[in-house]
Image (cartoon, helix red, strand yellow):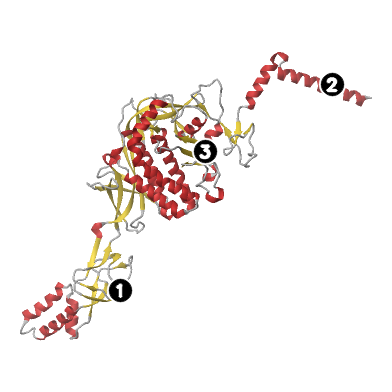
Amino acid sequence: MKTNINNILKATGILIAGVLLGWLIFGGEKNNEEAVHDHSISNAAEIWTCSMHPQVRSNEPGECPICGMDLIPLAVEDSEANPAVYQMSESAMKLANVQTIRVGSTEAGQKVRLNGKIQIDERNTYTQSSHFPGRIEQLMVNFTGESVKKGQTLAKIYSPELVAAQEELLQAASIKESQPQLFEAAKRKFNNWRIGENQINEIISSGKVKQVFPLKADISGIVTNKMVELGDYVESGVPIYEISDLSKLWVLFDVYESELGWIKEGSEVTYTVKSLPGRSFDGKISFIDPLINSQSRVATARVEISNKEGLLKPQMFVSGVIENPVEQGNDEIIIPQSAVLWTGKRSVVYMQESGGFKMREVTLGTALGENYVVQEGLQRGEEIVINGAFTIDAAAELAGKPSMMSHENEQVDQHHLQEISIQEKKALLPLFEAYFEMKNALASDNNAGAKMGARNMSKAFTNLNNNDFSSNSKMVRRQISRVLEQTMEGLNDKQIEDVRKNFIAISEAMIALAKAFDPLDAPLYVQHCPMADNNVGADWLSREEEIINPYFGESMLSCGEVKWVIR
């Protein structure tokens, strides 16, 4: 009986607790509608979707039911928020690697980045020639790269002239007491052929004519060029070897016209060598070429370096930086170049505002290396995006928000775009043709074809004539040129996986160029593969809407989606 009473009490207590809990949660019938409304907002706080199949929606993370990929968070939209502001969830911002700074916190300075090669010091290169005519009977140094010492025998030469001269010397030596002048004249002939006193005395003491004579090295160094073969007949003064002293070398940097004003003799440069990771070297510019190459439009800046350890070798690739502090006024606003997006004649940045991002047009002034002076459009203390702005712009365009290519003044801006494209499309077309050549080769798993496309891109970009572009367009090209230079360098030695990694940065540069100039008359498709770059995702440009993935080739040829269209 006692047990039954206890059970009844427990059941009654649970029932009362349930009623009270329901009353506390729902607040009675009066607040029932508000409770339902709040619950719906909570469920919509974060929506998850598939990057390859955007029609998939889920209230919680998981896998795509179509392809099995992990779902990613979708940007949250607030109906009462500013329609010009694009909202992103914290997870989406992390995926896009969005970084911001407060305006006014950037230090101004002209940082010039240079690329170049190590070369032989021309002053320490010597051409070893034959001092007498004859036929090469024996080569003692048979390949380039061999180290030689001064006085070392390089070759043995048979010379009819030397044979006759030896006979004259022996005859003159036999009558030198009565005809000393004749003896001295015979010896002088040998001196003209750079045959020393010791060798002359050997001939006289032996009384025999030598059939071959040794050619000795005039200096010590490394043989950098062998110009003859066994059996060749050489005249006096004909080059046989090129010998270089590699204990001192030159670093020759390429300097663009726009950068010449920031570099002078005596400028300090810090440089690194690709083959020596983790090490940096310091030097000073000792000479700047007064002539500019008419094809590449660059001048050469020289740094003289010591190489006593022998670590550095000619033709090694070098990357250098010259930093020049720039005096700026207290009222000037400086922002990094990475914050600026371009389209036509307009430059924009993304502001962090109301928990999201809003595009704002700015007027730029002087370029200071990797920074710009802002003349109009920003105030100190405002927060702007310096990394990930391109990703935000692409997402904003897909979401129907104002973006770089869809602006409130789009009609005016498109007029500017067409106006500049008339003179620039023809110059830019070879660059895009070479890019599509590289993209198609990667999609076909053709590494050699991809490298050929990259070389054609580099050539096409070099051939672009600065004078055909407006000042704003030149600034766009300067930004993109650094990406192309760095990614193209050393591409010939890479496997196809490494070429595809470089293609990510190349594509980002080309997408920026396409959005700025609209180079083709037909639409261009910006396509995205979420699995490229170790599942970080990567974009590329295509003329066709059909997905032909360059990052995986035949193994995943149709993986990806169209992010947006440049029309």
- For the residues bearing labels 2 and 3, Cβ distance under 8 angstroms: no
Q: Which mark is residue 140?
A: 1
Residue 81 drawn at (x, y percent) = 53, 21
**Amino acid type, residue under disc 3 in the picture:** Val
Mark 1 to mark 2 CA distance (whole Å): 111 Å
Q: How many angstroms separate mark 1 from mark 3 (CA)?
A: 65 Å
> Which numbered circle lies on residue 562?
3
Q: Is residue 269 above or below residue 566?
A: below
Q: CA distance from mark 2 to mark 3?
A: 61 Å
Name the mark nearer the viewer: 2 or 3.
Answer: 3
Percent position of residue 42, x then y: 63, 25
**Residue 28, image x, y percentages:** 73, 15
The C terminus lies in quadrant: top left
Image coords of residue 260 (percent x, y): 27, 41
Work out whether mark 2 precedes mark 3 in sequence or the reverse, and give the earlier one.
2
- Give residue 12's mark: 2
Q: Is residue 399 above or below residue 138?
A: above
Residue 280 visible, this angle: no
For mark 2, give the secondary structure. helix
Give above or below for 461 relative to 494.
above
